[in-house]
Structure formats: C-alpha cells, structure tokens
Image (cartoon, grey):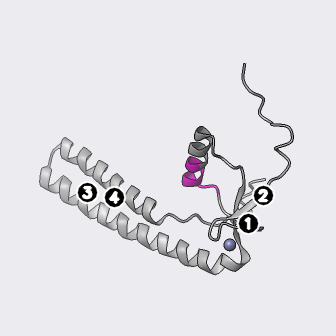
Amino acid sequence: MKKPKTRPGKQAKSESRCIICGREMSGAPIADDVVIKAIRKAKGALGVAKGSRLVVCKEDLEEHFKRRKKFEKNMVQYGAIAFVLLVAMVVLSGSLTGVVAALLIGAFILLLGLVGNYHPSLLKKGDGNA
Ligand SMILES: [Zn+2]
C-alpha cells in the first residue's frame, strides 16, 4: 500500500520563498531547469522538500541578474577550458581511452563550474508552468 499523495491539513499553504534573501516573499518565479528539478528530486527523496515555490523578490531582482550574469559568464569560461582540454587530450593521446577520459574530465570541469556558481534563471513569460 502506498501512502496517499495529499496530506490533509498540511497542503493548503503554498508559500513562495526568495532564493536570495531566503525570506517568504512573493516575487518573480524562477524557471524549473534541470538543476532545480534535480535538487527538488533529491530533497523529495531525502524527505526534506518544503514544497515552497522559488521566487526572486522585488528587492533582490538586481542581485539576481548580477548573479545570473556571473554564472553564465563562468559557464562560458568553464566550457572553454573543458573544450581546450578535451581537444588537447584527444590530440595528445590519440586513443579511444584518451577521448573517453577527456570527455569525463570535461564533464567534471563543467560540473564544478555549475556547482560553484549555479544560479537559476527567472521563468520567462509564456513558459507556462501552470
Ligand atoms: Zn529576496
């Protein structure tokens, strides 16, 4: 037997929480991208999901755009490093093992960039997440 999905009494409140200041505020919703979904899934699996909507409050919009821009810039840089390394390793090794290793290292570098700087984007109008 599976537990019913809805817990009576605990469901009604759907709060939104600002991802920057952490306060319960209403604001611009952030987009559900791959990372957010993964985090949500992980939290759900751990049983610590709060089910709050993630937003950026008005006061933090400027900060949000700053962080998002920095993140995007960083990812471009990490991507460039990963690419150069990949090409170098493929050229130097000239073997399939080298290519596989290069791909793994490249992916690892990208992941490092993602973990260190990740900042979600805002939900664009028309994405329709309703
Ligand atoms: Zn805020």
Q: Amino acid at mark 1?
A: Lys
Discs 3/4, front: 4
At 30% from the left and 66% from the top, the residue drawn is: 81
At 59% from the left and 54% from the top, the residue drawn is: 36
Q: Position of residue 89 (x, y in %)?
A: 19, 55
Q: Amino acid at mark 4?
A: Ile
The one of 15 and 56 positioned closer to us in this rendering: 15
Cα–Cα span, label 4 and label 2: 35 Å
- Residues tagged 1 and 3 counted as in contact (Cβ below 8 A): no
**Label 2 or label 3, whichever comes before in sequence order:** 2
Q: Amino acid at mark 3?
A: Leu
The one of 74 and 60 positioned closer to us in this rendering: 60
- Residues tagged 3 and 4 counted as in contact (Cβ below 8 A): no
What span is colored magenta in the figure? 32-39
SS label for mark 1: loop
At 13% from the left and 50% from the top, the residue drawn is: 93
Quick one: quadrant of the N terminus? top right
Q: Is residue 41 above or below residue 55?
A: above
SS label for mark 3: helix
Q: Which residue is mark 4?
A: 109
Cα–Cα span, label 1 and label 3: 37 Å
Q: Which mark is residue 15?
A: 2
Q: Which residue is mark 1?
A: 125
Discs 1/4, front: 4
At 30% from the left and 48% from the top, the residue drawn is: 104
Q: Position of residue 7 (x, y in %)?
A: 81, 37
Cα–Cα span, label 2 and label 3: 44 Å
Q: Which residue is mark 3?
A: 86
Prevailing secondary structure of the magenta residues: helix
